Image: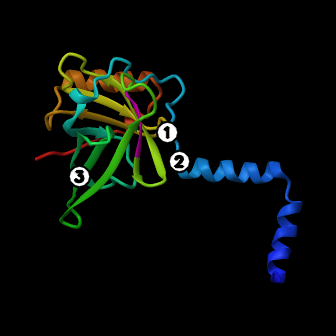
Amino acid sequence: MRAPVDSTLQNHFQRVPVSLLGLLTVGVLVLATGCTGVPKGVRPVDSFDADRYLGKWYEIARLDHSFERGLSRVTAEYGRRDDGAISVVNRGYDARRDRWKEARAVARFRGDESVASLRVTFQWPFSGGYHVIALDDAEYRWAMVSGPTRGYLWILAREPQLDPPIAEKLVAEARALGYAVDELIFVEHD
């Protein structure tokens, strides 16, 4: 014999329109997978070589977010995993607490690996977009990265400092694409 609660729930769900259940399912999936798309009008680099991109990068500038707030000496290190995905290790120094913070993630391409558009998962099942939108094609010495919206922007370099003319060029490109470059935080490295 079924408990009355089971039959009550069964009757309730029989009355819920299938389209509403579908909508709720899609909503949960969207929240779980996060936003990994590219901002409208922004194009990821399309001649990308992931193996050349691997290694250590220094964060030169960023738009502020709670997960990096107050951090200096921020770096990102990328490596190839056995399964073909890319490992991500982000580190930054929190001077207020006198300690290093570290976050690990896994990045996977959203499509063709020659297009620098990835989804990064720090905590499953939530993912975010990582799109290289400018890159030193010749030597992979600097890059500019967007998140899923224009609220996310990073300028990265292989060294703790970036030549001012290059930094100015990247900031101008970001401004032309609609990023709030006046809010960029230039990261201290010592």
Under tag 3, what secondary structure? strand
The quadrant in which residue 176 appears is top left
The residue that mark 2 highlights is 33
18 inside magenta stretch: no
Q: Residue at x 25, y 17 (%)?
A: 137
Q: Furthest-left residue in view?
A: 190
Q: Residue at x 41, y 48 (%)?
A: 121
Residue 65 x %, y %: 40, 50
Q: Residues within 10 Å of mark 3 (few under 14, many from 20)?
A: many
Give the amino acid at mark 1: Thr
Verify CB contact (< 8 Å) between mark 2 and mark 1. Answer: yes
Q: Is residue 31 above or below residue 133?
A: below
Residue 96 x %, y %: 23, 64
Query: In what quadrant of the picture does the N terminus appear?
Result: bottom right
Which of pointers 3 and 2 indicates the residue nearer the eye? 2
Residue 130 x %, y %: 40, 37
Q: Residues within 10 Å of mark 1 (few under 14, many from 20)?
A: many
The label shown at residue 91 is 3
Residue interval drawn in magenta? 116-120
Q: Furthest-front residue in view?
A: 1
54 to the left or right of 147: left
**How far apart, in angstroms, are the residues tagged by discs 3 and 2?**
24 Å
- Majority secondary structure of the magenta segment? strand
Give the amino acid at mark 2: Thr
The quadrant in which residue 77 appears is top left
The residue that mark 1 highlights is 36
Residue 183 x %, y %: 38, 40
**How far apart, in angstroms, are the residues tagged by discs 1 and 3?**
22 Å
Under tag 1, what secondary structure? loop
Q: Residues within 10 Å of mark 2 (few under 14, many from 20)?
A: some
**How far apart, in angstroms, are the residues tagged by discs 2 and 1?**
8 Å
Q: Earlier in the sequence, mark 1 or mark 3?
A: 1
